[in-house]
Amino acid sequence: MNEVITRRVRAYFAPVDRTTGTPTLFDATQTGSFALDTPPTPWIDLGWCANFKRASGSAIPLRSGAPAMAYAQVRAEAEATVQFELVTWGKLQLALTSGSQQMNLLTTNAATPLQPGSTANTLEPGDTTIAFQVGDVIVVDHDYGGQTGFVGAGVSGAYIRSETDVNSDTNYIRRISLNIARIAGIANGALHLETPLLAGAPSAEMKISRVTGFVDREGSSFFQEWSALFVMEGEQGDRVIVHYPRLQAMHGAAEIAETLSAPLDRIRLAGAFRALPVRDAIDGEMVLCFRSYLPA
């Protein structure tokens, strides 16, 4: 038996297939000891988080009589929530904590097509006259062509009810896409990316747009949904892993200011999430989250 002594909590998220409701599952037996800087595919490292808090809202006693007394031990209702603050800012961090749709600010209405041979790490622009630069943030996704339902490569970034909702905007899917990366280098016209595209190798129909920043809108109707892992690395070599197969945000965008040294503040992204249930294939139980402990 050991005490669990840890310094910080590391957060990892992965997509949920919104069309089928299929989350990203995690097997602590097979991959529970992964290196923190290199999580297994398709988990995305979102960095360290602060003020990590979990809560169970499950009601257990079944009460009967007057006065009401505990009659039996059953789960009358089940609920689980988690909240934390993300130290680093970026597209995915903003999308997760915004509680609404997260959009890209595109620099131009003209997207650049791709040549054959593009991969998740290297893009071959079809129009070599476009002057991309090292450090540019780009998004890679399809033109909008009348699609309805969930859209966005790799992760659903919006739900389109009708073509009239988006005014037939050719760039709409690239505006809401989470399939973004930063250009780390350029050689012989090829764009080498700092991190792989979330959706993997792009299809031939996808195009590239430059991104100057990101914006979310309080009150929009779309809810992001993610699978999540939170890892607490013990000082004695043990590890606690909390896995939420399905999380949706409980509130809108919020920030927390931490004073460093006046007048400097560090701004953290505050997120609070409610867990949605999945059916465990082992025995058919409906489950909200899994906690694993790996001894040293």
Image: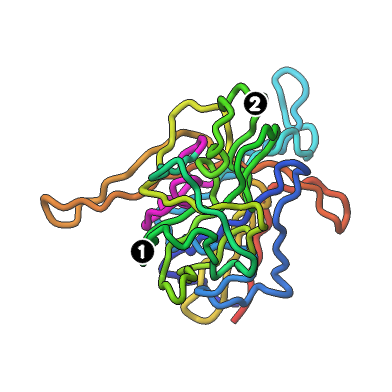
**Residue lying at the far left of the rendered structure:** 262
Viewer-proximal residue among 90 and 255? 90
Please determine whether, in this image, residue 149 is positioned above or below residue 21. Answer: above
Viewer-proximal residue among 184 and 287? 184
| Residue 18 visible from this viewpoint | yes
Q: Earlier in the sequence, mark 2 or mark 1?
A: 1
Q: Quadrant of the N terminus?
A: bottom right
Please determine whether, in this image, residue 285 is positioned above or below residue 222. Answer: below
Please determine whether, in this image, residue 186 is positioned above or below residue 268. Answer: below
Residues at discs 2 and 1 in contact (Cβ within 8 Å): no
Viewer-proximal residue among 77 and 19? 19
The amino acid type found where label 1 is placed reads Gln
SS category of the residue bearing label 1: loop
Mark carried by residue 133: 1
What residue sits 64% from the left and 57% below the top? Answer: 243
SS category of the residue bearing label 2: helix
Mark carried by residue 255: none
Viewer-proximal residue among 154 and 278? 154
What residue sits 53% from the left and 81% below the top? Answer: 237
* Magenta span of residues: 82-101
| Residue 247 visible from this viewpoint | no
**Residue 96 part of the magenta segment:** yes
In the image, residue 181 lies at what x, y percent?
48, 60
- Residue for badge 2: 163
**Residue 53 part of the magenta segment:** no
State left or right for residue 93 relative to residue 142. Answer: left
What residue sits 51% from the left and 35% below the top? Answer: 100
In the image, residue 74 lies at what x, y percent?
79, 39
State left or right for residue 259 relative to residue 178. Answer: left
Estimate how packed mark 2 is, as few (under 14), some (14 to 19) or many (20 or more) residues with alpha carbons within 10 Å. some
Estimate how packed mark 1 is, as few (under 14), some (14 to 19) or many (20 or more) residues with alpha carbons within 10 Å. few
